[in-house]
Amino acid sequence: MTPDLPDRPTDTRPFGLKHLFFAFLGLATLFVIYNNERFIVDHADPLWDYYKGVRGALVPHGIAGAVVLILGATQFSTRLRERHTRLHRVFGRCYLIGVAIAASVSIYITLAHNALPLQVAIFTQASLWVLASATAFYCVRRGNYVLHRQFMIRSYAITLIFVFDRLFDALPRVVALDTDVDPTILWLCNVLAWVAPTYIIAWPALARATGTASVASRV
Ligand code: HEM
């Protein structure tokens, strides 16, 4: 059985940077649904035909991905973790199952539907997603909550590639760099999804770094 989560200081700020980010994410996701996923209901959209051969696989992939996107956001709520720890655990398990389904189906889709350059980018994204999520699970089972949190941030950053890749594509001229044979933007997202969490995780220590150590203490 997983031990109880340790006490963490309650975030009493009514509206901080984290809330601002999730508010932006909500709006960005609505934009992506409207801009990129309309084909699900509008079958006159050329994307409906584009996905003809893999529509059956897109259903479990899209549903599992959406569950991960929504549940993942709730996992960063300090209130949910502190007051409803059991729910945090249930959501966490559903998140992991969602990642396992969405990632494995995405490998099938890309092998069936994409050219080799995009297949390599997708395979990298899916592998890092599974790796970060499985590591987060391993850490919490071992009772290491600090590392658990860090790897959940990494895992969720990869989940967010779904939104940010499509946001980049909405910029003029950029969409030409996100194709089957030139997935430059997806590679950019893969790199950012690993670099951004590094800075988010290090931020408290970076903010405290003052450089006041004497020469003697460094030798
Ligand atoms: C590591 C994470 C993910 C990988 C590797 C991945 C992979 C893929 C692949 C290979 C395709 C088909 C692309 C094509 O044929 O051109 C696709 C499409 C799709 N994915 Fe994912 N995906 C991921 C995360 C997500 C998430 C989190 C969601 C849901 C929120 C999602 C929802 C969709 C949807 C709705 C489509 C079809 C429409 C579209 O391409 O915009 N995916 N994904």
Image: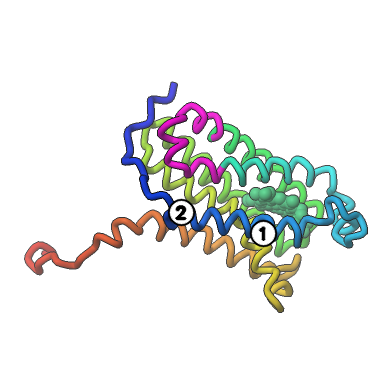
Q: Residue at coordinates 85% horizontally, 59% vertically from top-left?
A: 47
Q: Residue at coordinates 89% horizontally, 62% vertically from top-left?
A: 46
Which residue appears farthest toward the top when viewing the image?
A: 1
How far is disc 1 from disc 2 in space, using C-alphas? Answer: 32 Å
Q: Is residue 141 visible?
A: yes
The picture places residue 202, in percent across and down from the top left corner, at: 35, 57
Which residue appears farthest toward the right when viewing the image?
A: 44
Where does the C terminus fall, quadrant-wise? bottom left
Q: Magenta region: which residues?
A: 72-91
Amino acid type at image mark 2: Lys
Q: Which mark is residue 18?
A: 2
The picture places residue 149, in percent across and down from the top left corner, at: 42, 43
Q: Helix or strand or loop: what does disc 2 sit on?
A: helix
Compared to residue 150, the image places residue 21 above or below, namely below
Q: Residues within 10 Å of mark 2 (few under 14, many from 20)?
A: few
Where does the N terminus fall, quadrant-wise? top left
Front position in the image: 176 or 14: 14
Closer to viewer: mark 1 or mark 2: 2
Amino acid type at image mark 1: Val
The picture places residue 207, in percent across and down from the top left corner, at: 29, 62
Q: Residues within 10 Å of mark 1 (few under 14, many from 20)?
A: some
Q: Is residue 110 visible?
A: no
Residue 157 highlighted magenta (yes or no): no
Q: Which mark is residue 120?
A: 1
Front position in the image: 94 or 34: 34
Answer with left or right where residue 216 lies relative to residue 41. Answer: left
Q: Main secondary structure of the magenta part?
A: helix
Compared to residue 13, the image places residue 145 above or below, namely above
